[in-house]
Structure formats: C-alpha cells, structure tokens
Image: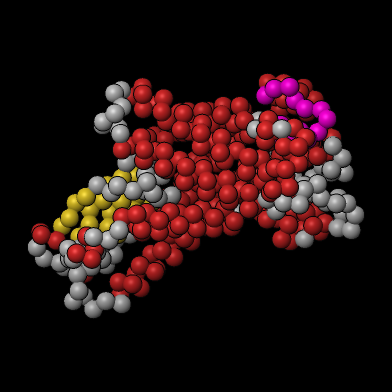
C-alpha cells in the first residue's frame, strides 16, 4: 500500500515524499546514498533542500550529469507554471477588468461599468469571443516564469554561501532584499504588459479597435510615449504590497499550520485550507494591488497620477473605499480554480507514478526520492 497522497505531496511543492513497496523490500544499508542536492531548481520557495536516495548505486546513476538534471527540472518547473497560469487565465482577466473598469470608463475604452463578475464574463465573450478570456496570458506566463526562475537561482546563490561568505544574518537578509528587487525589476514590464492587454477591451463585437496588438506592441508604444518610467509605473506600491504580504504571511502561518494539522491525511482538505489562507493574504494586500494596476493604466495617457499616495488619495476621494476591492470576488474564484488545478495535477502525478511502479515485477530495486523545502514557519 502506498502512503496517503497528503504524505507524498503538499502543494505547492512544500513537501514531497514517495516510496514504493519495491523500495522497502530492498535489503542492505549499502544502497542508501545521502546527498545534499546542489541544484537551483529545488529551493524555489526557501533556501535549502535535501534528499535521500535509495538505489542500486550504479555508475550510470551516480555519474548522471547534474547540469542535465537541472535543465530538465527547470523545463518541468516552467511547464508547470505555464500550465497553471493558463488554466486560470480567464479568471485573472475578469479580475483585472473589474478592478480597472473605472480607469477604462474615464479614458473612453469602456462605455458602462460591469454589473458583476458574470456580467463581465458575458460581455467579454459576447464582444470579443471566448478565447479573448486568455488575452494577456502570454505576458503573465512570461512574468511568472521569469520571476520564479530568477528567484530560485538567486536564492541558490545565497544558500550556497550561507555558511561561508555571509558573516551575519543581516547580510543574508540584505542580499535577499536586493535579489528580490532585481527579480521584480525584470518581471514587472511583463506584468505591466499583461495588465494592459487584459484591459484592452473592444466596445462591441463589430465596432471599435484594440489599443495594442500584442506584448511587444505594448512595450514599444509605452517606451515611445513615456520612456522607461512608463513600464514601471506603480512599481513602488508593488514593493509595498510585497512587504505587506510577507508580514501578513508571517502572521497567518501559525494558524494555517494549526488548521493543516487536522486535515493532514486528507489531500483535498489540505488544498482547501491552503486556498482559504491564500485568499486571505491576497485580500489583505488587494487595495495596494488595485492602486498599482490603476497606475499602470495611466501610462501613455495625458493625465497621470503623481505618485502612489496621490493615486490612493484620488481613488479614495472620488470613488470611496469600495473601489479598492472591485474584482475581489474574482480573486476568490481565481484561487478556487487554481486550487482545483493543483489538486488535479497532484492526482495525475500520483496516478502516473503508481502505474510506473506497477509495471515492475518487484525483482529490480526501485528508487525512493525525498525532497523537503524549508519555509518560514516550518511549512
């Protein structure tokens, strides 16, 4: 019998432990090989990773090129991020349309506000077609993949020197902050392009033309009208959102772990708990996200917000507090859909591994592979 799914995988890649019956039947301690995995792929979420491998210590396995395995893992990570982002792209676009509808009304791109999430879905499909729900997805996928890859490489750089060149925790913290800033600096133009494309609506199915034809058209026109500053409008408030999100995450982590304890043998329950806390984190920083997105929408326009504080003050004064949470309902749907995709990917992975193990007759030694990511709060 295999261990429960929740003991094998804690999404997203927080803990993975897989052992087959054939592995447990292997005799002798000489087959145990403990090693510190020197790959920038694994510590995606936090610094270090370790694993234990039980296998017949053949030279082919031991001498397998590490760089090749890194490349395969990197491609797998990119494919997983791309698949997950694409699967929930319609909810992301509706969230952005609801969030920025007042800016589009001011600039004449939208004739009347949306009546709600389902009205936004219906009008978008009616005027632009079903596949328009994925408009801007390419830029969002590029932003997510580039951000994750850069983040894990830089974190591996810190981890590899954590016990050597870094002399204090303060230096590590400062380096992490600098690397996070660099990561966001690279990914932000694609995030901006995805936001502009998602909010580039057609008034009707027969009338009106789009403002942008694609990602590079967004970047080209913005650079031409506003320069490099146009691509980073709202960047400062995004940094504040990241800092606030880190603080909220630290505060909620103990409660999340407490709830996860009661569903540790139920994989679907774990996914539901994580999804609920993820919604709480996003809603806590949602007003800052709204300000950032609406500042992006002013790039290329004649009238711009003077600063993040000016944008916050103007939105609050003219539209009220409620405007900061427009599209928040779509965030809940987005997280539910994302959790569903994650759960399906977990189930698919378990099925594939189960079929692979059943294909053996038990006469050949198997392999056990354990990966643990260390997160703040022990998650």
Of residue 241 and residue 61, the one placed in the foreground of this image is: 61
**Residue sitting farthest toward the right:** 207
Residue at coordinates 30% horizontally, 71% vertically from top-left? 357
Residue at coordinates 35% horizontally, 67% vertically from top-left? 353
Of residue 229 and residue 195, the one placed in the foreground of this image is: 229
Point out residue 173 in the picture as x, y percentages from the top left corner.
39, 26
Of residue 163 and residue 225, the one placed in the foreground of this image is: 225
Point out residue 297 in the picture as x, y percentages from the top left corner.
74, 36
Is 293 on the left or on the right of 336, as rendered?
A: right
**303 drawn magenta:** yes
Residue at coordinates 35% horizontally, 57% vertically from top-left? 69
Q: Quadrant of the C terminus?
A: top left
Residue at coordinates 85% horizontally, 51% vertically from top-left? 209
Is 232 on the left or on the right of 163, as rendered?
A: right
**227 drawn magenta:** no
What is the magenta segment's predominant secondary structure? loop
Residue range highlighted in magenta? 295-308
Point out residue 45 in the picture as x, y percentages from the top left corner.
41, 42
Point out residue 376 in the picture as x, y percentages from the top left corner.
37, 35
Residue 184 falls in image quadrant: top right
Of residue 205 and residue 171, the one placed in the foreground of this image is: 171
């Amino acid at each position: 019998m295999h261990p429960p799914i929740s003991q094998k995988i804690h999404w997203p890649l927080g803990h993975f432990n897989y052992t087959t019956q054939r592995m447990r039947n292997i005799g002798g301690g000489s087959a145990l090989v403990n090693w510190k995995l020197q790959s920038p792929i694994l510590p995606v979420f936090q610094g270090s990773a370790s694993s234990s491998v039980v296998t017949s210590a053949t030279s082919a396995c031991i001498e397998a090129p590490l760089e090749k395995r890194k490349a395969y893992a990197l491609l797998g990570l990119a494919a997983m991020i791309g698949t997950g982002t694409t699967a929930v792209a319609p909810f992301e676009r509706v969230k952005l349309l609801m969030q920025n509808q007042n800016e589009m009304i001011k600039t004449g791109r939208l004739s009347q506000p949306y009546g709600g999430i389902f009205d936004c879905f219906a009008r978008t499909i009616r005027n632009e077609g079903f596949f328009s729900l994925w408009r801007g997805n390419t830029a969002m996928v590029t932003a997510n993949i580039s951000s994750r890859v850069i983040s894990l490489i830089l974190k591996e750089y810190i981890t590899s020197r954590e016990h050597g060149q870094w002399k204090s925790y303060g230096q590590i913290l400062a380096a992490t902050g600098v690397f996070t800033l660099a990561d966001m600096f690279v990914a932000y133009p694609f995030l901006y392009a995805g936001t502009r494309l998602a909010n580039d609506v057609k008034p009707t199915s027969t009338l009106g033309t789009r403002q942008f034809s694609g990602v590079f058209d967004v970047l080209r026109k913005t650079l031409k009208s506003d320069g490099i500053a146009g691509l980073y409008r709202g960047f400062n408030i995004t940094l504040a959102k990241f800092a606030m999100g880190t603080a909220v995450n630290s505060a909620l982590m103990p409660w999340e772990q407490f709830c996860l304890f009661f569903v540790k043998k139920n994989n679907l329950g774990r996914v539901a708990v994580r999804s609920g806390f993820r919604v709480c984190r996003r809603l806590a920083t949602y007003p800052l996200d709204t300000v950032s997105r609406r500042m992006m929408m002013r790039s290329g326009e004649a009238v711009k917000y003077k600063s993040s504080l000016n944008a916050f003050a103007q939105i609050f004064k003219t539209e009220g507090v409620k405007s900061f949470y427009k599209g928040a309902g779509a965030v809940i749907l987005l997280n539910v859909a994302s959790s569903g995709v994650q759960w399906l990917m977990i189930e698919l992975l378990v099925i594939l591994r189960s079929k692979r193990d059943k294909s053996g007759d038990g006469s050949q030694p198997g392999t056990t592979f354990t990966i643990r990511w260390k997160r703040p709060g022990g998650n």
